[in-house]
Amino acid sequence: MGTLFIRELPVECVIGVHPDERQSRQRLLVSLEIETSFRDAAAGDELDHAVDYVALAEKIEQIAAAGRFHLIETLAERLADALFDGTMRRLEVEVCKPAALPRTRQVGVRTSRPVEDMDVR
C-alpha cells in the first residue's frame, strides 16, 4: 500500500451562504490523500496501472468551477463521491477556505471514503 497526495490545489467557485459571497468566485484550496496499491504501477512503470494525479486535479477543478455551493462541506462530499473508486482503499478530501476568518490562516473540512461502521446523519 502507498499514499498518493495532492496538497492545496487552488480552485475557484461560487461558495458561501452570505449574499456578498455569492457575487463572485472565491479561492479554495483542495487537498487529497489516496491509499492504494502501487504494486502494478511500479511493476510495469506505466501510467495505465497508476492513479493519474493530473486527471484527478482536472476533475477537482471542473467540479469546483461548475458548482455553486453554500457550504464547503457540500463541495468536499461531492468531490469524495466523484473521485473515490474501487482501486482505492481510502480517499480523504480536504477543502479549505482561506478567506473565511480574517485572523486565521484558513478554515476547512475533511471527509473520507470509505466511511465504514458509522452513521453520520
Image (tube, grey):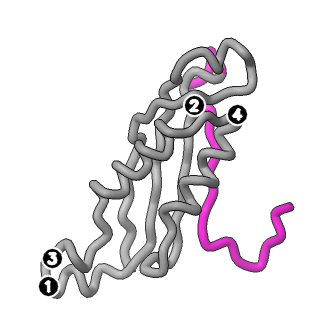
Q: What's the residue type where badge 2 is placed?
A: Lys
- Residue ID for mark 4: 70
Secondary structure beneath dot 1 equals helix
Question: Which residue corresponds to the image point at 25% horizontal and 86% vertical from the top-left?
Answer: 40
- Measured in 3D between alpha carbons, the distance from the residue under mark 2 to the one under mark 4, in whole angstroms, is 12 Å
Question: Which residue corresponds to the image point at 39% horizontal and 68% vertical from the top-left?
Answer: 3
Mark in the foreground, 3 or 4: 4
Instruction: Name the main secondary structure of what is drawn in magenta.
Output: loop
**Label 1 crowding class (10 Å Cα cut-off): few <14, some 14-19, many 20+?**
few
Q: Position of residue 46 (x, y in %)?
A: 15, 76
Residue nearest the observer in this picture, 7 or 59: 59
**Label 3 crowding class (10 Å Cα cut-off): few <14, some 14-19, many 20+?**
few
**Label 4 crowding class (10 Å Cα cut-off): few <14, some 14-19, many 20+?**
some
- Residue ID for mark 1: 44
Q: Are marks 3 and 1 in contact (CB under 8 Å)?
A: yes
Q: Which mark, by number, is residue 46? A: 3
Mark with earlier residue (4, 1) = 1
Q: What's the residue type where badge 1 is placed?
A: Gly
Q: What's the residue type where badge 4 is placed?
A: His
Q: Which mark, by number, is residue 76? A: none
Q: Position of residue 118 (x, y in %)?
A: 79, 73
Mark with earlier residue (3, 2) = 3
Residue 86 on the magenta span: no
Range drawn in magenta: 101-121
- Residue ID for mark 2: 97
